[in-house]
Amino acid sequence: MKYANIIVNISHENLDKTFQYVIPDRLKDILNVGDYVSVPFGRGNKVIEGYVLEITDKPEYDPGKLKEIIEIKTDSRLVEHKLIRLAYWMKRRYGSTMINALKTVLPIKKIVKEKEERSIVLRLDEQAAYERLEMYVKKHQTARERLLRELINEKELDYRLVTSKLNISAPTINAMEKQDVLSVLKTRVYRNTAKGTKDSTDTAVKLNEAQEHIASGIIDEYRQGIRGTYLIHGITGSGKTEIYMEIIDEVVREGKQVIVLIPEISLTYQTVMRFYKRFGEQVSTLHSRLSDGEKYDQFERAKKGQISVMIGPRSALFTPFEDLGLIVIDEEHENTYKSDSMPKYHARETAIELASLHGASVILGSATPSLEAYYRALNNEYKLFTLNRRAKDEATLPEVHITDLRQELKDGNKSMFGRELKSLMEDRLNKGEQIMLFLNRRGYAGFVSCRACGHVMKCPHCDVSLSLHEGGRLKCHYCGYEREAVSVCPECSSKLIGGMRAGTEQVEKEVRKLFPYASVLRMDADTTAGKGNYEKILSAFANREADVLIGTQMIVKGHDFPYVTLMGILIADMSLNGGDYRSAERTFQLLTQAAGRAGRAGLKGDVVIQTYKPDHYAVTAAATQDYRRFYDEEIVYRSLMEYPPVGHMLAIMIESGDEEMADNYAKTLAEALKNDIMGSLQVKDVIMIGPTDASIKKINDIYRKMIYLKSKDQDRLVSLKDKAEEYRDINRDKRIRVTFDQDPVNGY
């Protein structure tokens, strides 16, 4: 017998309360998670409706006392129907409770006070109004007299204007309303995150031949009813956004809605303003920095069909659009598209699943596509389009200079600025042009390197850097290899070996010291902590209120500043040696994106890449913006090691406040998984690594253990994830937390 767990009210407060019903035989083969059903409820068996959250063969109560589902009432247009089905897919794919998956996808987190505008209108005709006015005069009711005179002249007044400017109290207004002299009208007003859209005008840009070829190709397929996944690989400045907007225009004119995902909140301002100018008030934004009221209103506007295009980071994917026609994921390679909390979903995969539920298309765009996306495009899972030149005729790729920091040190330069970068900075400041300085901190995981020769302490088995742990141990998080830390470089015997350390504040101080006459802005987690700070800094730099912008990866993605003619990349190696099999890919992407910020208008651009490994293929390929060269080298390494996208990985984290408990639990879970693997005919298809300590063994007094599983068959990893969940449920202990990550983007 099968049972369905049903929720009868879709709201955040009631997500944890479900009711179980028997699935009658006539519905067993057709009922699905997410279906809208009618059920008998309560002692009187009142017929109510609800959504199926889960189907199980385990009764939670006496089966004889459970009631049956009456019928399926699913309307495929229901937003909740699709989102619940998506939540169930996420639960199965990534490992999570259904409740957590629902809380991720269901847009209405909590009801907030609705915002409304009030106005006061006159209810009396002219003769009756003057008669009432005369009575107020005789009775010396001056406040009522003053308000009525204004209403006779204007007929309708703003409530706030009346109370503030005319100094009329609320009791006076209420009294006159009871006398049928006036009415107070209330209008629901939605908070609009699209500031300044009323002045928007249609500024459609004429596409060049290459852009037009891509846009028309996707539009033609859309008109034919073909719904596919497309990858647009275009170099920086090639005009991918203009292509998106051309296709979006077609989809919106067909009455469909569009979701545009961007990787960072910092991109919202520049990106969104371009969409505002094209689509006006059809556009809205959704991101974590909005207030509860602003978020709630955007969800409501989306459900009511008042907006057609929603722009925002990963969470905007769950906008409750009823007729979704297209999902665009810009800069699809960014790791911010992978959730850090359960369920640890990837927006790219989840968007494709959501699109299939709606019958929508997906467009992925990047100058440096993820290996996963490009691999699938080459295997015809996605349709690939390529842009090889910049959109503006006067814009050319910048000249790239590679500075060997080992040689700088040998020549006596211990500054973080190489001689060539200093010289070019002075030149640009004298010309009144702008400079961006990028500190490549992404992927930093305590790696150890030699400043004299650039040697990095690596795992002899995995070709990734060893991570520095407490107690002076160097560890590999892919095979478990470890060794003692070193104080002398094994390559050149220099004592200048240790963990890499650098910060944006340190860079800012050095710039001000070297160029005291320059105006400097810094953009990092500290300077952008407040609401609106991203936009203020970017706007100030765009308006040329500063000569130099210093920042981490948030400054290198998607921004278009025409007067930036120099990009300095201070330490390229900080992500190249991140102790992660994705380090080379991440470094290539960051360096290419950073290089693409210079020379985007008619002015000549220069890029300086400072590195201890000037011959590494990630650095040299980024210098020439040669993606295919990088891909061909990197995919060989991934194939040999069976890393994604050629193979797949499942990371299982066990956490507990008790180290011994975490260790014992991890060992017994690993044994259970090993027995499952050994009992399978596909035993050779799965490799288990661990249990081992996480890269950061303890956070906030919580100990962390890792088990890694590798296989070319992702379905096999999903089944092993199910096995681990089953073990967790049988051996449930509140002191232990078990989480899963399919194809992790960030190392542990």
Image: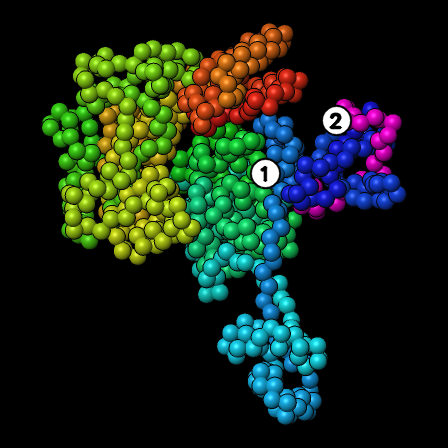
Q: Which label belongs to residue 56?
A: 2
Location of mark 1 (residue) = 104
Which residue lies at the image location 49% right of the left edge and 57% below the top edge? 194
Q: Which residues are magenta?
A: 56-81
In the rendered structure, which amino acid carries the disc numbered 1? Answer: Thr
Which residue lies at the image location 52% right of the left edge and 32% below the top edge? 341
- The correct choice, above or below, for 699 with respect to 82 in the image is above
Which residue lies at the image location 78% right of the left edge and 32% below the top edge? 20
Q: Which label belongs to residue 381?
A: none
Q: Nearer the viewer, residue 159 or 235?
A: 159
Residue 252 image point, x, y percent: 57, 53
- The correct choice, above or below, for 630 with respect to 312 in the image is above
Task: Examine the image and state in which quarter residue 34 appears.
Answer: top right
Quadrant location, the C terminus = top left
In the rendered structure, which amino acid carries the disc numbered 2? Answer: Thr
Residue most toward the front?
Answer: 139
Residue 493 image point, x, y percent: 18, 13
- The correct choice, above or below, for 364 with respect to 310 in the image is above
